Image (spheres, helix red, strand yellow):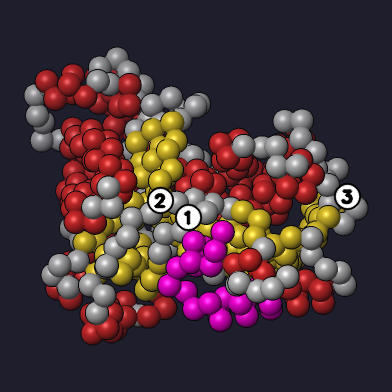
Amino acid sequence: MNYTELYANINQEQTKKRYDGLLDAFVSRYNALPAAFFSSPARCEIVGNHTDHNNGRVLVGAINRDIIACAAPNGTTTVNIFTKNYGVITADITKTEYDASEQGTSLSIAKGMLAFFKADGYKIGGFDAFIDSNIISGVGMSSSAAFEMLVCVILNDFFNGGKLGTMQRAKICQRVENEYFGKPCGLLDQCGIAYGGVTYIDFVNPLCPYVETVSPIKLNEKMLLINTGGDHSGLTEEYASIKNDMQKVAASFGKKSLGEVKEEDFYKRKEEDTIEYKRALHFFEENRRVKSTLNFVKQNDAEMFLICVANSGHSSRYNLRNCVKSSETSSPITDALDDLKKIDPTCVARVHGGGFRGTVLAFVKNDNKIMDKINERFGAENVMEIEFRNYGTVAVRPNEIFGEQQ
């Protein structure tokens, strides 16, 4: 493991200060040295927009934003996690019962992880941790899944000798997010963060999805996540309607999800000018597109990779229709997509994640003037330059990644 495999295009001196500051904070708070450092990445969705919920295919990548942690077993029944942003999280390993009032909190994640490790017959124990995150929450980088996987890997490494495999870790984190944190997510976020690199997932068998991880593609363009703003509240029905509309079409074939419907059978169906049909069409086209994109990543064919991303974005906007609410003709998402094209006519941009509000993923010319215009339009604080990284959540040795002598 080397520095660029984790933090490509991030200033190494700044990252070194980040790790040194974390170590100093851990020693100051706990009056002890940590046993290990850990890094848990954010993720971005590449193609496969809203396909996983109907047992389809996705392509997701781990990126160079992360949560880092110093941690050490403490020989007690208490888990202590100190965060710069959210204060102290304290959990008793003997009291892990679900509490509805804790839904949506970091404490619910810590308690849920302890509960499910114990329920599955794995060992748990008390530990101290100090964490620092540069993953911005609420902008589609899956900060909650990154935190889940961080706690999971700490428990796995400290108390179970690394017994849990990558898919086991992803599934236990999904259960925690569903049942304790209270978010009905699929496995996309957890797999992308657990496996690292660029991860292809086929959910045709949701209980045992097929996963393949490949090295990230090399691009000349800058890859950006841009927060377009807007209120996510009140969008539950909009998100649910996508899954429901796809399932209505599946039901017409006697199936529960579109992933169970044969592609050739769908295309025999007469075209309809309905949102249900358009969303089903997006599913089948996107499913095929995911496999093509995977092949172009393997071939390091940047031109065709970006064409696939562009086509995915077009389908999301005009077939899936998750860029505007049903009552709108435009939104912060569509305005952002249109303005990016005006700033850089060659850019490739698409809605990122759930849609309606939130972020877009953009690949733009590596040009300072273009970046200045993008920062002016959206605010520099809302423009995040990102890169893929080869590793998922993992224990790291700072001496190794910074090239220092032991």
Q: Is residue 202 visible?
A: yes
| Residue at point 32%, 60% (across, down) | 218
Point out the frontmost of discs 1 and 3. Answer: 1
- Residue extent of the magenta highlight: 1-21
Along the line of sight, which residue is nearer the eye, 383 or 15? Answer: 15
Q: Tag 3, which secondary structure?
A: loop
**Label 1, on which residue?**
390
Amino acid type, label 2: Ser
Q: CA distance from mark 2 to mark 1?
A: 6 Å
Quadrant for the N terminus in the image: bottom right
Gap between marks 2 and 3 measured at Cα: 40 Å
Q: Are marks 2 and 3 in contact (CB under 8 Å)?
A: no
Residue 149 sits inside the magenta stretch: no
Q: Residues within 10 Å of mark 1 (few under 14, many from 20)?
A: many
Please name the residue that numbered disc 3 is placed on. Answer: 77
In this figure, which residue is indicated by the disc labeled 2?
Answer: 215
Q: Is residue 406 above or below residue 391?
A: below
In this rendering, position of residue 400 left or right of residue 97: left
Q: Residue at x 66, y 56 (%)?
A: 395
Tell me whether circle 2 and circle 1 mark residues in contact (CB < 8 Å).
yes
Q: Earlier in the sequence, mark 2 or mark 3?
A: 3
Q: Which mark is residue 162?
A: none
Disc 2 element: loop
Whether the magenta-drawn stretch holds residue 8 is answered as: yes
- Specify which label sits upstream in the sequence, 1 or 3: 3
User: Whole-percent x and y of residue 32?
Assistant: 86, 69
